[in-house]
Image: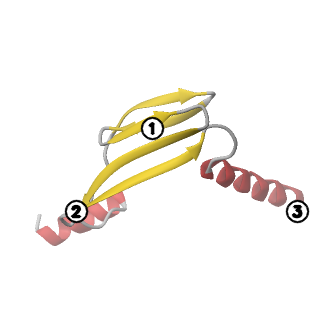
Amino acid sequence: MDREKMIARHYVETGILGAYETAEVIHEEEENGKYAPCFDDATVFFDKNQTTTSRIMCIEGRRYRICSVLPAAGHTPTDKMLALIDTRFEKESHSA
């Protein structure tokens, strides 16, 4: 298979175009009924008030330090997105 076909196939299968590959999830931590994926290239710190994930990403020879800080309790971006989806489904079911 030539290089262009391999690149196209990789994009179709993964949705990733280029050399960057995501790290594998090595395990999931559970805290208060919520799950946090733990990657082999990241460090996760669970605190009473927040959860912090830190990782170094190398993209095209440049290093980037990525740090995500989410509240330990309350609403995460994922919680908000799921609530939005639920609201949309409720509206659709009432209008049908």
Q: Which residue is mark 3?
A: 95
**Mark 1 = which residue?**
37
- Looking at the rendered structure, the secondary structure element under dot 2 is loop
Separation (CA) of disc 1 from disc 2: 22 Å
Q: Quadrant of residue 8?
A: bottom left
Q: Nearer the viewer, mark 1 or mark 3?
A: 1
Under mark 3, the amino acid is Ser
- Percent position of residue 38, x then y: 40, 36
Q: Which x, y percent locates residue 11?
A: 31, 64
Image quadrant for the N terminus? bottom left
Amino acid beneath label 2: Ala
C-alpha span from label 1 to label 3: 37 Å
User: Which image quarter holds the C terminus?
Assistant: bottom right
Marks 1 and 2, the one that precedes in the sequence: 2
Question: Splitting the image into 4 quarters, where does residue 59 fall?
Answer: bottom left
Residue assigned mark 2: 19
User: Dot 3: what SS?
Assistant: helix
